[in-house]
Structure formats: structure tokens, C-alpha cells
Image (cartoon, rainbow, N blue to C red):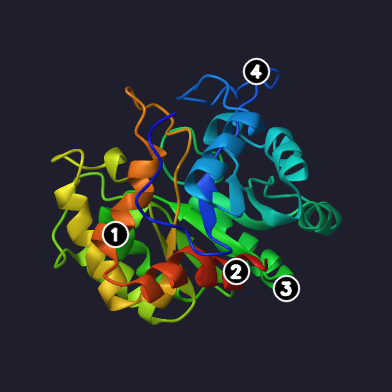
Amino acid sequence: MSAAPQLKAPPGACDTHMHIYEARFAFAPTATIKPPPAPVSAYREIQEQLGLERVVVVQPSGYGFDNTCTLEAVAALGASARCVVVPRPDASDAELEKLHAAGARSVRYFMLPSGVLPWDTLEPMAARIAPLGWNINLQLDGRELAQYETMLSRLPCTLVIDHNGKFLDPVGVGHPGFRTLLKLLDGGRCYVKLSAPYETSKTGAPKFADVSVLARALVNANPERCLWASNWPHPNQNPQPSSAAMLDLLLEWADDEDTRRNILADNPERLYGF
């Protein structure tokens, strides 16, 4: 395990995006990334190292519609955990209510290779989950955001966008996709996760300067709509990034302790109902 972070996490700090992989669960035929096991026991060590009290387990794209591993993880992590699931489009209301009771608060739309929910199901799904107080968790190439702005802005539920917008080729703050992201945040029903800069950065560690420009712009524009996430176990990354280093990037992205407390604790508490 890497060294402890410099940043001291506030009470109630939450990791809003991580995954659990267990060897006994088979990957879906659609899986394009098949990470090695990353069990709850290993994540508990990361939680302790980073001083995090809460967590949101995100259904890995590799498991498709089988949420069993994610739900088992939430049960093991207890009342301080929530999850993001991938129900089938025709899931019954009873199934959604059962997922809610198990800790689900969001449906994942992964619009990259291995995603299993298509765009044409997003609006109907959003209408179904809105009464439950859930959100849509969207990951896409942020360069495409402008073409979906109209649809995303009319969703009846909250929207959460992954990984600083996940611009697969880092862009400037004037890019139409980034301007769309800022507009969605300003609308008051959208959040963005400050996370996984290594997935898109061309400048690389330790500062990820090209993505850090975007992260700082998001915080400066709307800190009440920003979340933080480790993206542990950093799927498909070799060597594996330091989760402590990911947390310490908040020292670069957010200038003061109050803002970092909002990002780490207050905003996720409000969004996920801790």
C-alpha cells in the first residue's frame, strides 16, 4: 500500500465511485476489461488509509446486468455504503424497489465499449427512478456532451457525470462539451465526479495538468455540484495509481478546506442520502 495522503479527510468523507471484483463472479460476454479480484477486504484497507467513512460501489461494466457482486459488497460495507446498479430496461417496479432497499441510489449508463444500456432507454429509465430519488450516473466521452445537452437537461431526476466529464482527448475550458457540462451543473440537478484523471490525461502523473485544468474550472464554477472518487481499483491501469495521490489532487483542485469538505462529505451526503 502506498503512503498515507497529505489531505486529512473530514468527517463523513465519501468515495463516490469504486468497484468490487470477486473471482467467483463471471464477467459478461460484453466485457472488454477483466480486472483481477478486488474484494471488499482490500477496499477496507484503502478506506482506512484515506480516512473515508462512506462509499458508493459502482457496478462494473464487466458484470453487465448481474449486480450480485455489487449488492454483496454494499451489504458487507453496511449502512455507510450505497451503490450504482445496472438493471435491465424491463426491470419491474418491484425489482427497483428491492434494489433501493439494498442500497441502490443510481443507474449506471456507461456509453463506452462494454456498456449494456443504450441511449434510447435513458429517458424512460430516468422517469422510472425519479420517484425513488435515484440519479442517472453517466459516463461518456465528454466531447459528445453538447449533442445530448437537450435530453440531459430535461431529465426528471438528478444526473451525475463521471471523471471530470471524461474527455477522451483532453480539451480546453472553451470546448462545447465542457461548456455543456458547466451549463448542466448550473441547472442545479447535475453533479460531476472529480476522479480518474489518468484515464484521459496526455500529460500524465503526478499533476495530470491537462485534466487538472478542467477539474479546477469545475470546482471554481460550482463546488456545490462536485464530488470526489478514487475509482479504485483503477481498472485497466498498469501500474496501478496511488489512491492516496488521487485524494491529494484535491489539494490542487480546491483551494480551501471548506470547499474540500463540501466535495468530500456534504455534497455526497445530500446526493446519496447518507
Q: Foreground mark, 1 or 4?
A: 1
Lower position in the chain sequence, tag 1 or tag 2: 1
State the residue at coordinates (18%, 38%).
204
* Image coords of residue 267 (percent x, y): 51, 71
Query: Element under label 3?
Result: helix
Which residue sits at x=78%, y=43%? Answer: 75
Q: Amino acid at mark 1?
A: Leu
The percent coordinates of residue 179 (x first, y second) are: 24, 70
Q: Which residue is mark 1?
A: 251
Q: Amino acid at mark 3?
A: Pro
- Dot 4 amino acid type: Ala
Q: Quadrant of the N terminus?
A: top left
Nearer the viewer's eye, disc 3 or disc 4? 4
Eye-nearest disc, 1 or 2: 1
Q: Is residue 222 above or below residue 216?
A: below
Which dot, 4 or 2, sits closer to the camera?
2
Which of disc 3 and disc 2 is earlier in sequence? 3
Q: Residue at label 3?
A: 131
Which residue is the site of mark 2?
Answer: 269
Q: Earlier in the sequence, mark 4 or mark 2?
A: 4
